Every structure is written in structure tokens, then in C-alpha cells.
Amino acid sequence: MQKQIYKGIVGGLLTLGIILAFSLAALAIDKEVAENPLLYQRGSAKPAVVEQVICNVGMVHNRIHNSTVHKATGTNEQTILFGDSNAEYPSMRWLTPALYSGSNEYLYFGSLRIGIGDKLVHLASDTSPGIETNSINDDPNAISHLDTYYWISDDSPNVGPDDYIGIGVHARTYAWSETYRDDFIIYDFYLKNLNSDPLEGVYVAWHADADISGAAGGDGTQGFWRDDKPGYYRDDATNEYISYMYDADNPTIAGDD
């Protein structure tokens, strides 16, 4: 998606829905404050409030956090990340079927990629003051059973002058627990231009390394991804464009897994 972003105006909206299936689950939030992963870098930024919220609403659970560091490798990706690459917490975990509800992960990790021209936007965790949460159980102004929000930008000493562009992101998620809308999480991203002049040719993309399920047919180190397949639905008449992944039949396992 290419967009022009004007000063101080929300310049873009990305909405991701992971749509799966079934049943009702109670609200449970696990919120942690972790050590700032950027302290080892040069710069005079104050320590960030790096937090994570475990979304346990409905039938899809996921780790939501404001750290730009890839958990499994320790690499600073300098962008918004999703899920838990270290398999410690839910990572787009679907609770159906119940037999595999504790291990039915659909995501290794995902990321939001923002570019302008031939440069990538380098977001920094030390610009994020933490994650806010809300729920319609407690606040009539909330949207879902679990709303999350945080701000992050590239306006940081940890972003070098050659990499600074001047973009901030309002990052929000929504999840519900009713049976008719309990099988997806919505991600909304609003981009803000921090410059006095418009930014031309801004690109926004969604990256997902989807390793779908390891329950049935999950033998060996390739069990999680060997049988994963991509799909794409396009309808120009209704402006519907949906990319998706699904768990197909593993050719190395007898029968239909």
C-alpha cells in the first residue's frame, strides 16, 4: 500500500483480522514489564516501559508487546512485532480443536514494515511509554473485551540521523469473547507524519512468518511448517483483498493430518 502522509494527520490505516472459529472464553490479561532491550545501544534516551499483554480473549490468543526486539534471536528488528517467536507465550494460538488448544500456534512472528523510497522506517521502543488496556466490562467507552493501545515512533537517539524519517504509529488491537465474534483479533495502525512537510511515497506492508500448528503430522523439526500453504482472495468489485495461510496435508505423514 502506497500513501502520502501530511503533517500531524493520521496518514494510513491497516486492519488485520485473523478469522478462525468457535466458542466462548473468559477474559484474562497477563501484563508484564520487562527490561529495556535497547539499553545496550548508544543514545541518551530514557529507559522504555517495555510491556507485553497476553490476549486471552475468545478462541485466538496472542502476545501483544511494544518491543522491537525479536525474542528468539535477540535481533532488534526496529519495527512493530507480533506474537512470540520463542514459543513461551501464545502466538496466534487457536483453541480449536480442544485436544491441541495448548499448542495450536499459527504464527512464528509477524511484523509491520514501513518504507519511504528505498529506506525502511526504524522504530524505537524507547519512544513508547507503555501499553494501555481497556475493556467493555469496565468502561462503556471501550470497544471490545480487550482493547490495547501504544504509541511508537522513530524519534529517538537510538535511530541514527541517516535512518530517521519522522513517522509515528498509534497501534491498537481489539478482541471479543462472544461466540459470534470470538475467533479473531483486529489490529489497527494509524501512521502519523512528524515532519512539517508531506512524506511522499510511503509504503506499508504486513509480514508474517506463519508456522501453522504442529499437533497432527508434526514429526521432526519441519513438522510445523512443512505442510503450510498460502492463499489469496481477491474481489475487485467489493474491494476485498485477503491473504491467508492454512494447514494442509503433510506429504511425509500417512493419512490426512
Image (cartoon, rainbow, N blue to C red):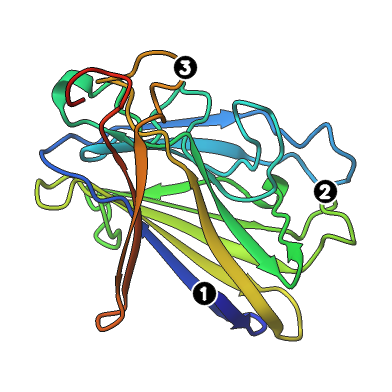
Alpha carbon distance from label 3 to label 2: 37 Å
Q: Nearer the viewer, residue 132 or 39?
A: 39
Identity of the amino acid at label 3? Answer: Thr
Looking at marks 1 and 2 on the same chain, the residue that comes earlier in the sequence is marked by 1
At a point 67% along the width and 79% down the height, the residue shown is 201
Alpha carbon distance from label 1 to label 3: 39 Å
Please indicate whether residue 238 sits to the left or right of residue 211 in the image. left
Local secondary structure at mark 1: strand
Q: Are marks 3 and 2 in contact (CB under 8 Å)?
A: no
Mark number displayed over residue 221: 3
Q: Are marks 1 and 2 in contact (CB under 8 Å)?
A: no
Mark number displayed over residue 158: 2
Looking at marks 1 and 3 on the same chain, the residue that comes earlier in the sequence is marked by 1
Q: Nearer the viewer, residue 75 or 245?
A: 245
Q: Quadrant of the C terminus?
A: top left
Identity of the amino acid at label 2? Answer: Asn
Residue 23 x, y percent position in the rendering = 10, 38
Identity of the amino acid at label 1? Answer: Gly
At a point 40% along the width and 47% down the height, the residue shown is 133
At a point 12% along the width and 47% down the height, the residue shown is 178
Q: Based on the displayed image, in which of its 4 quarters is residue 4 positioned?
A: bottom right
Alpha carbon distance from label 1 to label 2: 25 Å
Q: Based on the displayed image, in which of its 4 quarters is residue 14 positioned?
A: bottom left
Local secondary structure at mark 3: loop
Establish if 48 lies above or below 102. Answer: below
- Provide the residue designation for mark 1: 12
Q: Based on the displayed image, in which of its 4 quarters is residue 40 positioned?
A: top right
Residue 85 x, y percent position in the rendering = 52, 30
Looking at marks 3 and 2 on the same chain, the residue that comes earlier in the sequence is marked by 2
Q: Residues within 10 Å of mark 3 (few under 14, many from 20)?
A: few
